[in-house]
Image: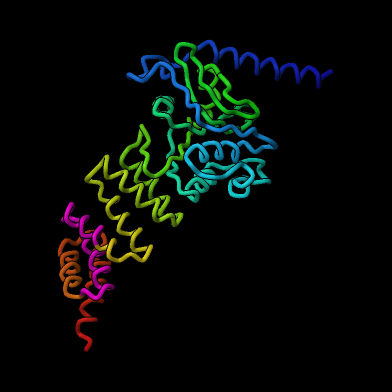
Amino acid sequence: MPVSGTGFFLCLILTIVTWGCAGTLPQQWSPPFNGMPVQHQISTVPFYPQTDYQCGPASLAMTLVWSGVFTDPEKLAGMVYTPSLKGSLQPAMIGAARRHGRVAYVISSPEELLAEVAAGHPVIVLQNLGLSWVPVWHYAVVIGYDADSAVVTMHSGETSGKDTAMGVFDNTWSRSSYWGLLTLPPDRLPATATETGYTEAVLGLEKAKKWSEAITGYHTALKKWPGNFPGRMGIGSAYYAMGDLSAAEHAFAEAARQIPTQGAAFNNLAQVLFEQGKKAEALAAAEKAVSLGGPMSGRFQETLEEIQSSLRRP
């Protein structure tokens, strides 16, 4: 009897929690959505049913395939699934997206979610379908919303195109602090991108050694923010890593021209000029970097001394 009573008590609580959330729509889910369409559905997102705690690989496969990557949940499981946890951690999901050449951009609010879906971008969301003290973590992919009906549409679990009341969804999603993930091709800017956030997301492609994709991502950033200094430096660094010194020289020279107060651009320019045998030009660039100083002045001085030493040798 005590067991049966406890089971009934838990079911009753879950029923009350779900009903209460469905009846109260948080303000951030209310129209007019800042001029966005009242409803939108992304019809091109494939569906992979979840099996045996594989909601992470399945959700990631859906957005990656949508973005043009040829993969499936089975291939992704080895990258993101942790058997001991019976689940997938967020850093693993981000890392796998980067290794597939996609910009992994994190969002953290209902407003951002709606804006991204309205722009045609599916969003992986992390929900807690249980309770705060008995969590049941679950990944799903939001592919649409309807403000008139107050629902979001998801590929979730074994159900394709599942409609969920916005109030209920808010309750389950808010427990992850509204964690959402975009996996976009590097030539496609998130609708809600910030300059710092997007540049850091593209830097993740560099860390994954996806040099060509990183270069494309930085160019995407520069179209939106022409004065983005980290983006220009990132292009040069990626070309340098690829061994294309001529392209790296051009990128660092452009960074120095655009923002002539940054010694790092002149220092890196000096390095690639020196490695191409252009020692006189390298010396001038290194001297300029040292004259500008800054937090990295010690490194600038090392570059200058290396070039000077080379010039003194017969």
Quarter of the rendering occupied by the C terminus? bottom left
**Toward the viewer: 171 or 280?**
280
The answer to which image quadrant residue 275 occupies is bottom left
Residue that appears at 26% across and 76% down: 306
- Residue 267 lies left or right of residue 105; in this view the side is left
Question: Is the image coloured rainbow, by chain, by secondary structure, or in one colour?
Answer: rainbow
Q: Position of residue 36 (x, y in %)?
A: 36, 20
> 46 and 8: which one is in front?
46
Residue 307: x percent and y percent? 23, 76
Please tell me whether residue 59 is drawn above or below residue 246 in the rendered image: above
| Residue 131 at least partly seen | no
Q: Which stretch is magenta?
A: 250-278
Q: Residue at x 80, y 18 (%)?
A: 4
Question: Looking at this rendering, what residue extends furthest in the bottom direction?
Answer: 314
User: Is any atom of residue 170 visible in this view?
Assistant: yes
Query: Magenta includes 112?
Result: no
Tell me the residue at 81%/22% (across/down).
Answer: 3
Q: Is residue 249 above or below residue 143?
A: below
- Against 306, residue 130 (above or below) is above
Name the side, left or right, on which 204 lies relative to 253: right
Most common secondary structure along the magenta stretch: helix
Q: Residue at x 55, y 36 (%)?
A: 62
Q: Position of residue 60 (x, y in %)?
A: 55, 39
Q: How many marks?
A: 0
**Looking at the rendering, in which quadrant would you find the N terminus?**
top right
